Amino acid sequence: MSAENVHRDTGLLAEVPSHVSDAFVETASLEAAVLDSIAEGADYAADAATVEQPGAAPAEPEDADAVETDSDPSDAEFDADADAGPESSAGTAAAVPPTGTMSAERVALKALEQRLLGGERKLRRREVASGAGLSLLSARKLWRALGFPNIGDEDVAFTERDQAALNTIVDLVRAGKLTEEAAISVTRAIGQMTDRMVVWQVEALVEDMVQNQGVTDAVARKRLVGELPSLVDALEEMLLYSWRRQLNAGVQRLAVRAEAGLASSEEGREGDEDDAPLPLARAVGFADLVSYTSLSRRMNEKTLAQLVQRFENKCAEIISVGGGRLVKTVGDEVLYIAETPAAGAEISLALCQAFTDDEILPQARVAMVWGRILSRLGDIYGPTVNLAARLTALADPGTVLVDSMTAAALEEDDRFVLHPRPAEDVRGFGEIHPVELRRGSGRGLVLD
C-alpha cells in the first residue's frame, strides 16, 4: 500500500484506485435469495415495511449506483467524515414493529434471518460505511465483491455484524497487510465460493426431503426454513474446519512445493515454450462424457440430475484420492490438476476406467498434459490447459491421450504404457503427436 493511498490527517485509506472497476460480478448471495423468496409472499410487505415519514426521500432507483458514482462528491475519498450527516449522527434507525399477525412460517423465517445475520436489521448503508470510516463508494465495492444486491439509502438492511465484517476487511488494509486490490479480490473469492456452496447445500437438503419425506419440491423448500436452525452450527463448524484444512493444503501446494514442481518440469524443454513464463508446473487433465448431450435429451429432470450428480461425485472422489484438485465441472466435463505427471496419469487412467465400468454413466474421453499454468480466481489458464482440451476432443471413448512431452516425462515409469498415435494438426498448436496412455504394472489408484 503506497503512501499516496493514505489520508494524511486521518490515517484512513484514499479512494480505491480507478482501475478497480465498479463492474464486479453481482452473484446471487444467500441473503439475496432469502429476500427474493420473502418478497414473493403475498402479505410479507405489509409486515416488513417501516412507517414512511413525511418528506422522506424517494426510494433509490435500480441503477442508483451508477448515478451516485458521478454525482455524490462524498465518495471521492476514504474520509472519516465523508458520509457523516443527520442520518449517521442520529444513530441507528428504530425498527418499526410489523403490523398484523404473522403466520408461523413467517415467524420462523424472521427468526432464522436474525440468527443468520446476527440480529435485527437496524442500519442503513451510509451508517455502516460511516461507522467504518469509508465513503459509500468504497463500502459498495466490498459489498459488490461479496455478491450483495443493490440497496437504497433508505433501506434498513444491515445489522451490527455487517458493520463488524466491514471493519474487519478495512482494518487489514489500514494495517498494511492487504492492498485495496487484494482485499477486494479476497472478498470476491469469499463471496463467490460461499454463494455456490450455499446453493449446493440448499438444493441437496431440498432433494433429500423430496426423496425421503415424500413431499413436493415446493413443500420441501418451505419446510427447509424449519429444518435449518438445527443444522446451522454444525455446517458453520464444518465450513471453518474445511477452510483451515484446505488453506494448509493450498499453502503446501502453491507455495512450499511450487519451486520443486518447476524444477521437475525443466526436463525436455528448451525454455522458449509458450508456457515458459507461467509460474506453476502442473498436470492438467480433462474428462468428457461421451454422448452426454443426446442422453440428456432423452432423460427427465430427475434422471438427468442423478446422472450429473453421479458423474461429479465419482470425479471428485477419484481426483481427491489421487492427490489432485478438481478445478471445476461444466456439465459433462471435468477439469482437474495434479502436482506431478505420474499423479496426473494415475488420476486420468482411474477416471477413464471408472466410467468404462459404470453401469449407468457412458464412457469418457480423457486427456492430460504436463506443463505450466497460471492460477487465478480459483481457475487455471495457459497453453497447457488449451492443449489438454484439444487432446480430449481427439481421444476415443474409453481412452486417455497425452502429448509427446508428457509422454517423455512418463516413459521411464513402468506403471504406464505409451502408444504413439499418428500426428494431428490441432488448431492453435499446429502439428502435435498424441500418445495413448495405458495401464502398465501396479494396481493404480485404490478407492476405499
Image (cartoon, helix red, strand yellow):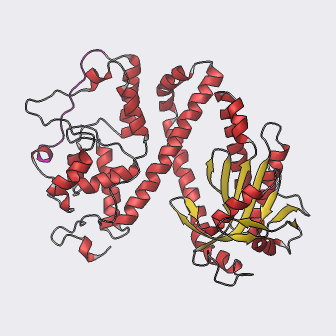
Question: Who's the residue at 24% across and 19% down the image?
Answer: 99
Question: Who's the residue at 24% across and 26% down the image?
Answer: 49
As for residue 97 lying within the magenta part, the answer is yes
Please identify the quadrant where the N terminus is shown.
Answer: bottom left
Q: In this rendering, does residue 322 appear at all?
A: no
Question: Who's the residue at 65% across and 24% down the image?
Answer: 211
The boundaries of the magenta stretch are 88-101
Q: Quadrant of residue 304?
A: top right
Q: Is residue 416 left or right of residue 73?
A: right
Q: Is residue 341 left or right of residue 219?
A: right
Instruction: Tell me residue 432's x, y (percent).
Output: 75, 70
Going by the picture, which residue comes out furthest to the right? 441
Instruction: Tell me residue 191's x, y (percent).
Output: 44, 50
Question: Who's the residue at 38% across and 59% down the image?
Answer: 184
Number of marks in picture: 0
Q: In this rendering, does residue 11 appear at all?
A: yes
| Image height of 328 relative to 90, above or below | below
Q: Quadrant of residue 78?
A: bottom left
